[in-house]
């Protein structure tokens, strides 16, 4: 299947948007919050929380 220029543009635009949102989350201090919530969910899943 051939990639069209429009398809390639959309893929690159989505990639740039994702990277910029990750950087925004890191700069705003959300990393700690996400890891705390993830560890709580994991502990509840295995029955320790």
Image: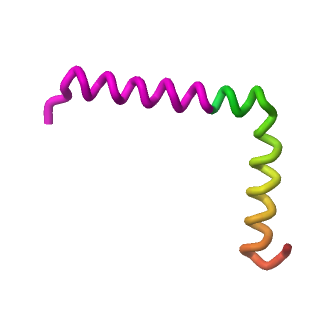
Left or right of residue 1, residue 36 in this image: right
Left or right of residue 16, residue 31 in this image: right
On screen, 22 above or below 36?
A: above
Please give the name of the residue rendered at 81% of the width and 34% of the height, measured from the top-left corner. Answer: 29
Among the 4 quarters of the image, the one containing residue 37: bottom right
Q: Which residues are magenta?
A: 1-21
Q: Quadrant of the N terminus?
A: top left
Q: Any magenta on residue 23? A: no
Please give the name of the residue rendered at 75% of the width and 65% of the height, measured from the top-left corner. Answer: 41
Relative image position of residue 34 (x, y in whole percent)? 75, 48
Q: Any magenta on residue 4? A: yes
On screen, 49 above or below 2?
A: below
Q: Quadrant of the C terminus?
A: bottom right
Among the 4 quarters of the image, the one containing residue 31: top right
Secondary structure of the magenta portion, mostly?
Answer: helix
**Farthest residue, direction left:** 1
């Amino acid at each position: 299947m051939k990639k069209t220029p429009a398809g390639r543009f959309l893929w690159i635009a989505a990639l740039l948007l994702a990277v910029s949102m990750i950087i925004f989350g890191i700069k705003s201090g959300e990393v700690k919050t996400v890891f705390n919530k993830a560890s709580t969910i994991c502990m509840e899943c295995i029955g320790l929380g």
